[in-house]
Amino acid sequence: MRIGVHAVGRMKAGPERELADRYFDRFSKSGPSIGLEFSGVTEIVESRARQAADRCREEAVSLDAMRRDSVLFLLDERGKNPSSEDLSGRIANLRDGGRKQLIFAIGGPDGHAPTSRDAADLVISFGAQTWPHQLVRVMLAEQLYRVATILSGHPYHRS
């Protein structure tokens, strides 16, 4: 199963990008042996619309176009906060059920459009706090690597 990230906003060079890239690289190297392929990060520019609702709606257009037959996991502070083991199990079930593509979506400063949240297969939160885009990307990258280590039985994740 291919796993990709759709992100509103571009990540600038710096330590956060280096750390995210390091975990995405680890995931891309450890995933194939367990049937997970990293398809990369798609970045879109933040909308310049005047109203927050209009910005969210404009930003949702590219996500809707990408999604098609993919499973969509949306990152949103109002979502569920699954454990790493639970997330791993959900991804393994999708893979084993024959799903071909999973997209994790990171919204812009205004979040996601309600239509995107409604269409999501799962809405995930990394906690009730609001996190900077750069840190969310790092945390997602690390969790994807952790998923691969859990599913492969690697000792990186110890319970």
Image (tube, rainbow, N blue to C red):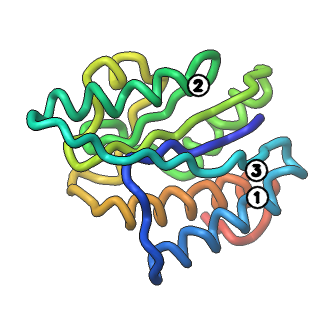
**Residue type pointed to by label 1:** Ser
Circle 2 sits in a helix, a strand or a loop, which is it?
A: strand
On residue 151, the disc is 3
Q: Disc 1 to disc 2, how far (Cα)?
A: 19 Å
Q: How many marks?
A: 3
The residue lying at 65 percent from left, 66 percent from top is 157
On residue 71, the disc is 2
**Residue type pointed to by label 2:** Val
Task: Specify the quadrant of the image occupied by residue 99.
Answer: top right
Q: Nearer the viewer, residue 108 or 119?
A: 108
On residue 81, the disc is none
Circle 3 sits in a helix, a strand or a loop, which is it?
A: helix
Q: Earlier in the sequence, mark 1 or mark 2?
A: 1
Task: Please determine whether, in this image, residue 73 is positioned above or below residue 17.
Answer: above
Spot occupied by residue 53 in the image (x, y as percentages of width and height): 15, 28
Spot occupied by residue 16 in the image (x, y as percentages of width and height): 45, 76
Circle 1 sits in a helix, a strand or a loop, which is it?
A: helix
The residue lying at 46 percent from left, 40 percent from top is 105
Q: Quick check: 120 left or right of 96?
A: left
Residue receiving disc 1: 28
Q: Nearer the viewer, residue 6 or 13?
A: 13
CB under 8 Å between callouts 1 and 3?
Answer: no
